[in-house]
């Protein structure tokens, strides 16, 4: 019986504490595949942060700060916010809604090493699995009033593969002088917003390697296809039967998002460009005439 009264007293004490103390609860409703550009996390599609506040007779301080930590898939901290420079929020009684950008605190978040450089250069972090941990603290930053961690993924994209003209192929100059059709596969996985594809064709000049031409020469064609389309028809308007015939070209497709920014593949340094392909334009009639002349010369 004495033990029962002790247990009852303990329960009553806990209830009294819960009633008298102000209550703060945190809910991170984070999209598990948010937009890859961290500056876009204010968009509702990425979710929201809800902080509920219930005042109590004591410790009734509605002012709080947020501490944000970014963790890798193993739970190691790879970025954290500065609690001293964090914004002070004054909660109202009831539900307080915030964006996921408020939870992330991008301007107050310091990432480690290469991640910081990558974010500065591309506006995003590398594809992979991460955890976002947010803590609600008192203004002094020494008391955690609520905490929650959410898992999320930055999508890894497979860039398009060039299909036509295929690498190493030869095009008949009589056909190429009117149109050349370029085809490629689509971005995998599909993006919520239709990507744009920028088609570039560069001539390989005598004495150049294909990559020297690709990096140094001005493109003959530099156009963007209709959003989502994986085909582009080039109305060449070039003298294919004379000066352009029997030359090599290198082409590629750069995949851009709805903001016109490159969609990175596994290699973040290629700026969303597919592996290039090389093709030739051949004046087959001219080659046939040349072969006939050679045959006539060697006839007895």
Image (spheres, grey):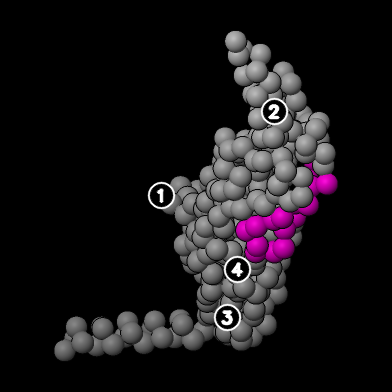
* Alpha carbon separation for disc pair 2 and 3: 84 Å
* Alpha carbon separation for disc pair 4 and 3: 32 Å
| Residue tagged 4 | 192
Q: Residues within 10 Å of mark 2 (few under 14, many from 20)?
A: few
Judged left or right of residue 179, residue 126 is: left
* Alpha carbon separation for disc pair 2 and 4: 54 Å
Residue segment shown in magenta = 219-237
Viewer-nearest residue: 163 or 134? 163
| Disc 1, SS | loop
Q: Are marks 4 and 3 in contact (CB under 8 Å)?
A: no
x then y, percent, for residue 8: 28, 87
| Residue tagged 2 | 289
Q: Residue at x 83, y 46 (%)?
A: 237
Q: Is residue 163 above or below residue 43?
A: above
Q: Are marks 1 and 2 in contact (CB under 8 Å)?
A: no
Question: Quadrant of the rendered structure where residue 141 is?
Answer: bottom right
Which circle's residue, 4 or 1, is located before the other in the chain?
A: 1
x then y, percent, for residue 45: 62, 73
Identify the residue at the far front of this view: 300
| Disc 4, SS | loop
Tell me the mark number nearer the camera, choosing from 3 and 1: 1
Which mark is drawn over residue 74? 1
x then y, percent, for residue 292: 65, 24
| Residue tagged 3 | 52
């Amino acid at each position: 019986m004495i033990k029962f009264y002790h247990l009852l007293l303990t329960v009553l004490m806990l209830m009294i504490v819960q009633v008298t103390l102000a209550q703060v609860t945190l809910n991170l409703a984070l999209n598990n595949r948010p937009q890859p550009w961290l500056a876009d996390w204010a968009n509702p599609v990425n979710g929201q942060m809800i902080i509920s506040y219930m005042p109590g007779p004591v410790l009734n301080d509605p002012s709080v700060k947020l501490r944000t930590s970014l963790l890798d898939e193993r739970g190691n901290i790879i970025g954290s916010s500065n609690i001293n420079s964090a914004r002070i929020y004054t909660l109202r009684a009831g539900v307080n809604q915030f964006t996921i950008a408020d939870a992330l605190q991008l301007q107050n978040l310091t990432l480690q090493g290469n991640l910081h450089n990558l974010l500065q250069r591309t506006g995003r972090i590398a594809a992979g699995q991460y955890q976002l941990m947010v803590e609600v603290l008192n203004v002094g930053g020494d008391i955690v009033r609520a905490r929650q961690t959410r898992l999320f993924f930055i999508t890894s994209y497979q860039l398009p593969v060039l299909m036509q003209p295929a690498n190493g192929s030869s095009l008949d100059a009589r056909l190429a002088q009117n149109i050349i059709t370029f085809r490629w596969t689509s971005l995998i996985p599909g993006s919520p917003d239709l990507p744009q594809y920028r088609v570039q064709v560069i001539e390989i000049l005598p004495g150049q390697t294909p990559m020297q031409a690709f990096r140094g020469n001005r493109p003959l064609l530099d156009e963007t296809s209709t959003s989502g389309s994986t085909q582009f028809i080039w109305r060449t308007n070039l003298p294919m039967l004379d000066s352009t015939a029997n030359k090599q070209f290198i082409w590629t497709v750069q995949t851009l998002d709805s903001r016109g920014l490159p969609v990175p593949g596994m290699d973040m340094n290629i700026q969303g460009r597919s592996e290039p392909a090389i093709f030739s334009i051949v004046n087959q009639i001219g080659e046939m005439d040349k072969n006939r002349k050679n045959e006539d010369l060697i006839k007895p």
